[in-house]
Image (cartoon, grey):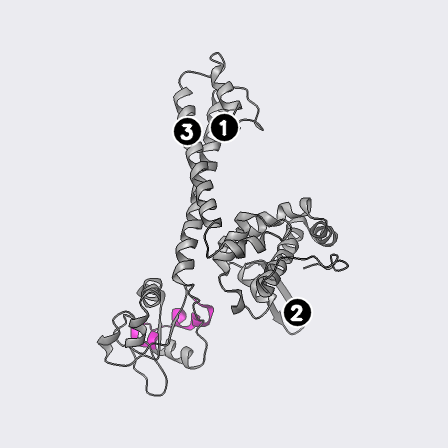
Amino acid sequence: MMQGTQYPQCCPTGRPWNLPACGLEHDIVACTPAFRVFWSLQSLSISPFVAKRYGVRRFISMPRAPLMLRAIAAAKKKNDSIDAAKIADCLRCDFLPECYMAPTETRERRRTLRYRHLLVRQMVQMKNRVSGLLMETGVSHNKQRLHKVGYFPELLANADAVSASIRPLLQLSRESITRLQRTEGAIIRSLQRDPLLAERVRRLQTIPAVGKVTALTWALEMGDTSRFRSIRQAISYCGLCGDEKRSAEKVMRTPISKQRNKHIQRVLIEAAKLAPRRNPDLALVYANARQKVNANCATLAVARKLVAYLMAVDREQRDFEPVRGLAGIAA
């Protein structure tokens, strides 16, 4: 890799973790995703003495393929030396995006919450499988009550309606669903009682239409909200806006950008779909937006308003208090 003279460069060995191999004191280390950036960042975060020992103040990485480095991929000649030179030039001109690294405690709890999402997906798959088995064998059932606690035993008790070939499969599926539900509930309760999150989650739940899952996801996925200079930046991070392409007087807005945190985006949109039913202020936001755009865009307007509420509560460090007279202002 290239070694610079006037500005900090990438590690000449091409391995960010092998800091002493280059024989240099690293003020800033920059690397690409091919060098297992996350592992290196996690190691530096877990072991602060490593960063202190080798003089590393900042660890700048390029998540996936930043748009500013398209010149590297589009070049006719490509090798490690040219890549390092381009990365160094971008670093000198402050074109490399810094990768925010949450504290170790937050990452551990965030991993647990994301595992809960995996359990929910498996639970939905099992429920769909149960419905498919019943429809495949022609068993008439109540779709609204199918996965209720009391209805399923009644359905299995009808020996004439349920075929003996699918009865063991239905029982196994129901046991799996019950086990997944208990595990998912235990994960949520443990995170709610966590001393690091309890007070913040309690404050966030004072916002209308913000439940425990939304509050936990916001607290763990957003981390320290002071890193966002404005609500617009937070909305962009959550993936609730599209790209803007402007040339002269021509402006074109694209659909929702893929450069976002998909975990917080999913939860906010799910909350925004139910929010107008539970809060009149958010219902007014939805109604005003619905007069101009379609239902999906109106849901995004409600989600952006929720982001504004969540950011305000985090910044003020107090419970949510609605301001009357401003409810009609759309996000």
Q: Magenta: predominant secondary structure element? A: helix
Residue at x 43% of width, y 68% of height: 99
Find the distance from the CA under tag 2 to the CA under tag 1. Answer: 50 Å
Q: What label sits on residue 283 in the rendered view?
A: none
Amino acid at pointer 2 = Lys
- Which marked residue is nearer to the observer: mark 2 or mark 1? 1
Which segment did they paint magenta?
Answer: 66-84
**Tag 3 secondary structure:** helix
Residue 50, percent across and down? 29, 72
Tell whether label 1 touches label 3 (CB within 8 Å): no
Q: Is residue 31 magenta?
A: no
Q: Nearer the viewer, residue 210 or 172?
A: 210
Q: Which residue is mark 3?
A: 175
Residue 74, percent across and down? 41, 70
* Apparent side of residue 206 relative to residue 56 in the rendered image (left or right): right
Find the distance from the CA under tag 3 to the CA under tag 1. Answer: 15 Å
Is any atom of residue 261 visible in this view? no
Q: Which image quadrant for residue 186? A: top left
- Which marked residue is nearer to the observer: mark 3 or mark 2? 3
Q: Which image quadrant for residue 168? A: top left
Q: What label sits on residue 250 in the rendered view?
A: 2
